[in-house]
Amino acid sequence: MADGFDIHLNEDQARRLRAAAEASGVDPETYLLQALEQAMEDGEEARRWAEYQRTGETIPLEDALAAFDAELKRNLAKRA
């Protein structure tokens, strides 16, 4: 994997990943990539919240609504 990461899962982790992916109706790689994306988004939201608490500065409403709209579209696409 160029410019990326290769990871190794132990037997238990691989079994749990397969079970979670199967329950979600996707293959393990797709499930893992979706979980990583969500974790990174959650981390970004936590960073922005900490920055707001530190500075009191907000983002424009249009930016907040665009982020909300994008998240809504992602969630609807997952259900399709």
Image (spheres, rainbow, N blue to C red):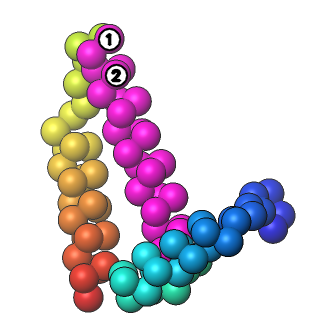
Q: Closer to the camera, 72 or 33?
A: 33
Point 27% across, 51% down: residue: 67
The tag on residue 11 is none
Q: Is residue 42 above or below residue 54?
A: below
Q: Is residue 40 left or right of residue 8?
A: left
> Circle 2 sits on which residue?
50
Tell me if residue 39 is in the magenta stretch: yes
SS at mark 1?
A: helix
User: Bounds of the magenta span?
Assistant: 31-54
Quadrant in the rendering for residue 68:
bottom left
Q: Closer to the camera, 65 or 28?
A: 28
Q: Closer to the camera, 7 or 64?
A: 7
Q: Is residue 59 above or below residue 18?
A: above
Quadrant of the frame with the C terminus? bottom left
| Percent coordinates x, y for residue 72 in the rendering | 21, 65
| Percent coordinates x, y for residue 23 in the rendering | 37, 83
**Kind of residue indicated by mark 2:** Ala
Point 27% across, 60% down: residue: 71
Q: Is residue 53 above or below residue 11?
A: above
| Percent coordinates x, y for residue 38 in the rendering | 41, 56
Q: Is residue 34 left or right of residue 70?
A: right
SS at mark 2?
A: helix
**Kind of residue indicated by mark 1:** Arg
- Near mark 2 (Cα within 10 A), the count class, few <14, some 14-19 or many ≥20, is few
Q: For the residues marked 1 and 2, what is the alpha-carbon distance in whole angstroms? A: 6 Å
Disc count in the image? 2
The reply to whether residue 49 is in sight is yes
The tag on residue 54 is 1
| Percent coordinates x, y for residue 46 in the rendering | 36, 33
Q: Main secondary structure of the magenta part?
A: helix
Dot 1 and dot 2 residues touching (CB under 8 Å): yes
In the displayed image of the protein, which residue is found farthest to the front?
12
